[in-house]
Image (spheres, rainbow, N blue to C red):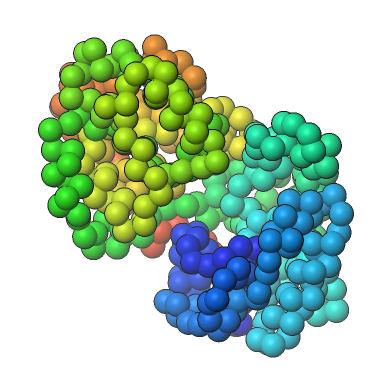
Amino acid sequence: MNIGMILDKSFPPDPRVENEAIELVKSGHVVFLFCLTYKREPLKEIINGIHIRRYVSNKLEYKLSALAYTISLYSKMMKKKIYHFLNENNIDAIHIHDIRIAEAAFWANQKLKLPVILDLHDNMPEVMKLYPHLQKFPGKQLISPKKWKQKEENFITNATKVVTVSQAFIDEVVQRTNIVHEKIVLVPNTVRKTFYKKAIIDKEILRRYKDNFVILYLGDTHLRRGLQTAISSIKELSTQIENIKLVIVGKSTTDSFLKQQVKELEIEKFVDFEGWKNVTLFPSYITASHICISPLHRNKQHDVAYANKLFQYMSFSKPLLVSNATAQKDLIKKKATGLVHKEKDVIDFTQKVITLFNDKNLCEELGRNGKEFIETEFSWEKTSKNLVHLYDNLTN
């Protein structure tokens, strides 16, 4: 089957898109990936067996994408490109990654009537409510998360199948849209075994942190991710753990707030902002760490989705400290892979760090449990089977 994946941004990188495409290629399908380019890149390229088809975009289209469900101009522009992509590559099934470009893909498919798989990476309408530019003029007036939610529900209803990332998200979608449970398929974000089995460790990173007690955070650093809690905690922790270091590997548009907080608390020597790093360096940072964190704020998105960092941490036998956002709290407690703190609670976060710092046996036990969970249940090689089964049986 020729599968046409639709992505509304440049590629690479996108770990979920790449992992899904590679797995489908391995199972005998041919995967073509529609994506955008904003610079001089090959318009046609093969990466890990994926047939990349890049379509030239620009800043205007990028800005219009935020208004996709305010005005229809972005969808109309993308429709023409996607229609060309579908015909040029003799696509048999469409796989849409998230909802920003979904309307354009549905429009492009009106005549072709191909089966459509809608892949919901996030609860996008709920995430949008937290964007800083939607809290003020003109974003607040121009962009309606309510309208995006209505569109999302329409896409879910009209898709042939829906794919999403957690059982909690599935339950929420089924309850909200009344689709039959069999229509939606669980394909969680997990790690490939090569991530931890074939990792190349950067000795310089290990050397840099060899004398520190490292608390590590990987990924998007937007304020909703809860790093302000961790930073506030460092002020107290630094008086009890003299060699403590909070290492933040990632970035977002709100980093200036985090750096200002560190400056005001006068804890610059205890916090390292590493910026975004290639994923190949993640194993080195994890190996150098003692505790790995995910201090998410609770909201409708975080309560139903897992961050991929959890499984990256576990694959290297590290104890986790996570907030009580429902999905991650339930997972960590069920599998006994870490401790849970109350969201935004600096005192609780601090106490849990101290507990882990003082109990090496507990850390080792939690780390072992996490490693075993990844090895036996939650590697990508195991969890991706649902996606392969979906496509192997799509024509039925």
Report whether 321 appears left or right of 77.
Answer: left
Above or below — where is 322 with respect to 178? above
Above or below — where is 288 with respect to 8? above
Nearer to us in this view, 39 or 359: 39
Residue 272, position in %: x, y?
31, 35
Nearer to us in this view, 335 or 359: 359
Report whether 86 appears left or right of 168.
Answer: right
Residue 289, position in %: x, y?
23, 38
* Location of residue 340 (image quadrant): top left
* Residue at the image point whose x is 84% and y is 62% from the top: 73
Residue 29, position in %: x, y?
53, 80
Asked whether residue 311 is in view, the answer is no
Nearer to us in this view, 318 or 41: 41
* Residue at the image point whose x is 78% and y is 34% from the top: 137
Report whether 201 appears left or right of 319.
Answer: left
State which quarter of the image contains the C terminus: bottom right
